[in-house]
Image (spheres, helix red, strand yellow):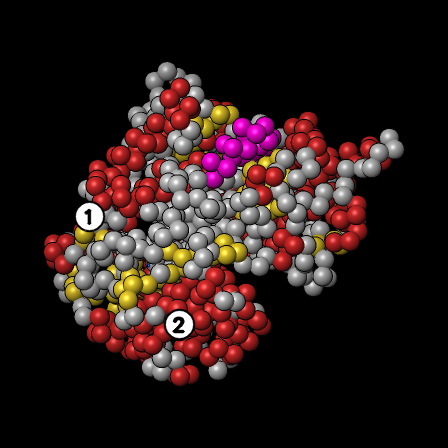
Amino acid sequence: MTEQRPEGIEKYDHPAGGWDALKAVAKTLAHQQIVAQGTMTLLKANQPEGFDCPGCAWPDPKHTSSFEFCENGAKAITWESTAKRSGPEFFAQHTVSELWQWTDHKLEDAGRLTLPLHYKAESDRYEPIAWDDAFRLIAQELNKLGDPDMAEFYTSGRASNEAAFLYQLFVRAFGTNNFPDCSNMCHEATSVGLPKSIGVGKGTVTLEDFDHADAIFSFGHNPGTNHPRMMTTLHNAAKRGVPIVVFNPLKERALERFAAPQDPIEMATLSSTPIASAYYQLRTGGDLAALKGIMKAVFQMDAESLDAGGAGALDRAFIEQHTSGLDVLRSDIDATSWDTICSVSGLTREALESAARVYVNASNVIICYGMGITQHAKGTSNVQQIANLLLLRGNMGRQGAGIAPIRGHSNVQGDRTVGITEIPNKALLDGMERAFGFRPSAEKGHNAIEAVEAIIAGKSRALICLGGNLAVAMSDTAATFEGMRKLDLAVHIATKLNRSHLLTARTSLILPCFGRTDLDTQASGPQAVTVEDSMSMVHASRGFLKPPGELVRSEPAIIAGIAKATIGNRHGIDWDWLIADYDRIRDKIEEVFPDFRDFNSRVRVKGGFRLDVAASFRRWNTESGKANFLVATGIEEDPLISNPDALVLTTIRSHDQYNTTIYGMDDRYRGVFGRRDVIFMNRQDLAERGLKDGDRIDIHGIAKDSEGRHLVQGFTAVEYDIPKGSAAGYYPEMNAVVALDRYDRLSGTPSYKGVPITVSAAAV
Ligand SMILES: Nc1nc2c(c(=O)[nH]1)N[C@H]1C(S)=C(S)[C@@H](COP(=O)(O)OP(=O)(O)OC[C@H]3O[C@@H](n4cnc5c(=O)[nH]c(N)nc54)[C@H](O)[C@@H]3O)O[C@H]1N2
Ligand SMILES: Nc1nc2c(c(=O)[nH]1)N[C@H]1C(S)=C(S)[C@@H](COP(=O)(O)OP(=O)(O)OC[C@H]3O[C@@H](n4cnc5c(=O)[nH]c(N)nc54)[C@H](O)[C@@H]3O)O[C@H]1N2
Ligand SMILES: [Mo]
């Protein structure tokens, strides 16, 4: 590597966490102009009487009321509770065409939205509109459609259980199951894959289980950035000597070494704790092969042990009593050669055997995984192979063991639980009928990809978004943007301005809502909402800050307003009554979903309660009544990817972003400062293409699109420690090269982590 690195690219030698994390928070507080109030706000995050941090879905430690420091949680909170406002003057000053030229960072940095807005084509501006007029307009457009299936109702994962439940009630009463949601782009492979394996589409572990694990495996997630509070757990485990085995194409700093800001000694002595005991840099998309390799080695160790008169490496009693399908799995693994496993995973047989030894030598194993597993064409199969590996040794449904999908948005799991799903099951329909006296449609609705496809095809004419930034989060930026602009109606319920709002439809509205930190007062007084974390714990969240403007409303109130204007009191639903006191919404949730028994009293207990996850107790709600070993066929690479010129691009989050929200331009742990227009590449891949570190290049998506639209121009190549054949770049910029039809056929999850590309010197 040349000494002279590209501008903004430096070597970052520090451990993750530590003083740099504290400094970063101080900078954020200053930037959001809220030093005094901000510090106070941070102290209420994830406290029994406070609000749930909107940062991520990692659970809160039980029984604690001590402040748990989290750099990126602090960023999420200050970003929401900022003193900046994008009020009427702001929108009078800037046309939509002008705002379109702004960066994503600058759009949101304009501050909190303060009043309902309606786009006027004549002035090319969003102009203030009264709430009732906004509701009337929406109702008119929705009722004009003729067919409710021509509307799409998107949900991003910050919506509370109460908001999400009311939303699905309205949408089902309106008459469709078109519920694209951010989960479709995220852990859908988990939601679809795990029910077939273990009878529930959620993780089986609790936070306490980590204290009893003897080994932890981590596949494809970056907790130092995306779930910093998880680092406390991993740090403790590492200190206890628990092996932590990581599979990730990139060396993520926090998984290598971490200095816990909570640890006075590490902070005072500038020391840190090594996290991973073994770090396997597999090729992007190599997980299916790697998992099969580990299982192959486990079967081998089992045979060797039996031959030597031992008890074998499998938990035979568990397998016999609780599972089905082992023989079929074993044949599949036997038929998969080490050659294939090694070439596809990019790992050696010895490496995989060594991982298998750690696995077999531990009594209790937890496997954690994130987007590196789910966002692939084989995402569902990836998830199921993780379950297989755990089942082989009975690592499911007992203390210290289990599967831990690490969820994204702070209530993405809860939204699903309370009915945001395009495929309603019988229990949901029965529950709705019981609670509201009507049976909603059972017909499958659209997921996120299908919704965007229908919008592009002009079949869906209306889009309502409960939060999020759908157009920017979705693949194929050019096609998606074009489709959005053809809509008749686009409504965004949001806290801050983003690019999706600027893709104006014939009628476009932005409706400003409260965030987690805001005090929500309704007719009966101040309200709390509830959320469910990654480990199925449901608890209350209560904001306390003065809302950003008098006209800003809560999400439930906005949904009720739209519903009342659109369907009146259809099915006898009294919307005003429901939102006057959120206890009433919770009573209805309980009526529909019996798991929420005594909801209002149980959620008032400090720390909340855990929803029933049958698999955690070895009850298998599958058709066979057992946990199933499931086979994944074909680990050979995708023909598109086998193109000799192609690289597999994975799209990742920087340390300074929350999905499409760009807090800043640094990615400290990866040594990138002040920019995002880079692509990380292997040295040899660069050389073979006549390129070098720092060259300006164009990135072409290899897709069916004949118009050559899948292109990112003028990015800088950065030589990086990444396996040959793999490349990495930032989401959402790279969505421009992700074709819409590249997704997991079983779950619909876009393969954001397996994008076939070619690169060339920049044309201009
Ligand atoms: N601060 C912050 N917190 C967040 C978010 C945020 O943007 N910022 N987003 C939230 C959301 S919605 C989500 S879903 C989660 C996301 O949390 P993560 O799942 O950690 O998300 P990514 O940044 O996409 O990182 C995926 C990791 O997988 C690795 N990877 C990429 N491709 C592969 C592969 O093929 N195999 C393997 N084994 N690994 C691979 C990458 O190198 C990276 O370390 O975080 C949530 N929390
Ligand atoms: N290439 C690529 N694409 C990806 C991914 C990837 O890894 N790579 N990850 C995917 C994943 S995992 C996800 S989850 C999606 C994320 O997709 P989304 O959830 O749609 O996107 P966000 O960026 O989280 O949404 C940010 C916006 O939410 C609004 N907002 C914030 N807080 C609130 C609130 O409390 N209420 C309301 N109503 N609005 C609020 C603000 O207006 C803000 O601009 O992106 C997906 N897209
Ligand atoms: Mo996500």
Q: Earlier in the sequence, mark 1 or mark 2?
A: 1
- List x then y, in percent, for residue 533: 47, 52
In the figure, residue 13 lies in which quadrant? Answer: top left
Q: Which amino acid is tagged 2?
A: Arg
Q: Which residue is mark 1?
A: 83
Label 2 packing within 10 angstroms: few (<14), some (14-19), many (20+):
some
Q: Is residue 292 left or right of residue 443?
A: right
Q: Position of residue 154 (x, y in %)?
A: 40, 62
Nearer to the camera, 448 or 423: 423
Task: Report which quarter residue 89 is drawn in.
Answer: bottom left
Q: Residue at x 50, y 32 (%)?
A: 235
Q: Nearer the viewer, mark 1 or mark 2?
A: 2
In the rendered image of this protein, does residue 474 appear above or below residue 272? below
In the structure shown, which secondary structural element does the residue marked by tag 1 occupy?
A: loop
Residue displayed at 46% across by 31% down: 254
For the N terminus, give its image quadrant. top left
- Label 1 and label 2: CA atoms lie apart by 33 Å
Q: Look at the image and tell me whether residue 698 can be seen.
A: no
Q: Is mark 2 within 8 Å of ligand 2?
A: no
> Is residue 83 in view?
yes
Residue corresponding to mark 2: 584
Q: Amino acid at mark 1?
A: Ala
The magenta region covers 230-248
